[in-house]
Amino acid sequence: MKFFLRFFCVISCFFLLNSCKSSRQKADLNVTNAKVYTVDTAFSVTEAFAVKDGKIIETGTSQFISETFDADTVIDAQGKIIFPGFIDAHCHFYNYGMGLNEVNLVGTNSFEEVLERVKNFSASHPAVKNDPRSEWIIGRGWDQNDWKNNQFPDRAKLDELFPDRPVLLTRIDGHAALANKTALKRAGIHYGSSIGGGKIEFRENFDQEDWSDPLMKVETGKLNFRGKSPSGILIDNAVKLVEDLIPMPSREAKEKALMAAQRDCFENGLTTIDDAGLDKEIILLIDSLQKAGQLQMRIYAMISSTQNNFDYFLHRPKIKTQYLNVRSFKFYADGALGSRGACLKEDYQDKKNWKGFLLQQAEYFRLHAAKMFENGFQMNTHCIGDSSDYVIGTIYRNQINPTGKDEDALKKYRWRIEHAQIVSASDRIIFKSVIPSVQPTHATSDMYWAEERLGAERIGNAYAYQTLLKNAGTIALGTDFPVEGISPINTFYAAVFRKDKKGYPENGFQLSDALTREQAIRGMTIWAAFANFEENEKGSIEKGKLADFVILDNDLMMSSEGKILDTKVLSTFIGGKIVYQRK
């Protein structure tokens, strides 16, 4: 009898254990023992979550998740910090990848250092037969404001070093460039050349060559022109006169660029990026690589505002997959403050009788705003100066909220002003209907010289992120990489503490417009997702959303200021699958 009783107990326990196990739900991944910032509406913190089919199926305590879900893989985070995957709301992903094979001029302290880097690059990258692009020396990243002599450089020394190879070196903001004589000649640039929405700088004709219009020479017999010649500096639309001559890279080079950019993004905890200006060919290449499983980065693609792109995208179904979202066009209203191409209402403080300029007439933007509205596309426009912000903001408002009474205009249309760098106090009302998309590290890069451009009064209207947020109720944060560094940790630090990576200035730059830690994280996650119409699928760690998340070794919400920039990304996950693991 005792034997049968004992046997019955064993059998009962066996079936009880198995029934408990069978009652647990199946998951692909359980993450437990973490400090998880969900970035939900309450900004709540939890310990664990479960993932199935690339999506989060539940969050809660480690005990609850472990007892409820039977997972193929379990990650014990051992108290590490987890945030939703970071979203860069404004960058140049493809161009960043291409730039990895060009001369990196970021951080140069003099024009002499620029020349040295170009020489070294040229020695290791000779022109290759049957590869016309390789003949060109292309670089990016110089900033004359960082040099002791902070005037624009001249092409003379470039001409000496490279009398035959064309050279184009773009300024860090992408809105100015230095070209050598060979490149200028190929572009047909001469004394008297001009272009709308751009500027060609001239200087005394030191090389004593004929820089007159070739057609004029035929008509008048004019020879040996000795007046002015191009200095090599091209601003905004003038850059394209040379840029458009550079042969296109091969498909293989484009693919390598995209994969290299993805690698660096994953290493920095980025799971979605907004590429601010892509052409049809690159967008379709991205789509094909994603569908083939080669490219896993989630991309919100802003289409470049060219006629070819309008013709292709405006009247066909929009592209929307889990990895690619194509529903916006990128426009440029003006240039950059550093190259004095930003369009201001009043003169530059350091250049009298000069206000910068719009890259197109206001009517151009009005006509295209109507087209965007009619075809259901989001309109995202680069605006730096207070004049361009006013012009574009007014056009936006007249198109999407003409009476000013539609309180849901911002949520319905989500038209964006990219950078929103200088906004007059009287124009801030625009952002009741428009999303400001800003880059906090621009403030800490520009703060050394921005007041020289704007003066003591107008500088208070610049980089005013807290002020913009109070008007819009949301703000999307990005880096503009490769203009700035790629790391979202730097974005967080600059947004909250308003200092550069050296901790300068001690009390922060215009600290009244700093964001709180919570606001900065929201701007890098859920608010950036909102700016992309994607807040229901990503941007927070909540049930039903994509399992994109990042594990950090440091708590950004609690850490001391001095330790923030030391934060390391330990792992990055896309759809619950690891795409980066720190070694």
Image (tube, rainbow, N blue to C red):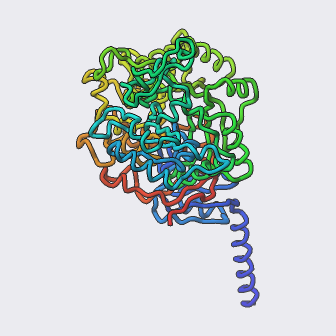
Q: Position of residue 431 (x, y in %)?
A: 46, 22
| Residue 521 visible within the image | yes
Residue sitting at the far top:
403
User: What residue do we see at 48% from left, 66% from top?
Assistant: 78
Residue 255 in the figure: left or right of residue 347: right
Residue 97 in the figure: left or right of residue 296: left
Work out whether residue 102 or residue 97 is closer to the camera in this orientation and state it: 102
Position of 565 relative to 428 (above/below): below
Position of 528 relative to 254 (above/below): above
Q: Position of residue 228 (x, y in %)?
A: 40, 22
Q: Position of residue 112 (x, y in %)?
A: 34, 45
Work out whether residue 577 or residue 480 is closer to the camera in this orientation and state it: 480
Position of 369 relative to 34 (above/below): above
Residue 185 in the figure: left or right of residue 547: left
Position of 26 relative to 499 (above/below): below
Residue 344 is drawn in which quadrant? top left
Residue 409 in the figure: left or right of residue 203: right
Query: Could you tell me how many numbered marks the image carries?
Result: 0
| Residue 40 visible within the image | no
Work out whether residue 204 or residue 237 is closer to the camera in this orientation and state it: 204
Question: Is the N terminus in the top left, top right, bottom left or bottom right quadrant?
Answer: bottom right
Residue 384 is drawn in which quadrant? top left
User: What residue do we see at 38% from left, 34% from top?
Assistant: 154
Q: Position of residue 406 (x, y in %)?
A: 55, 15
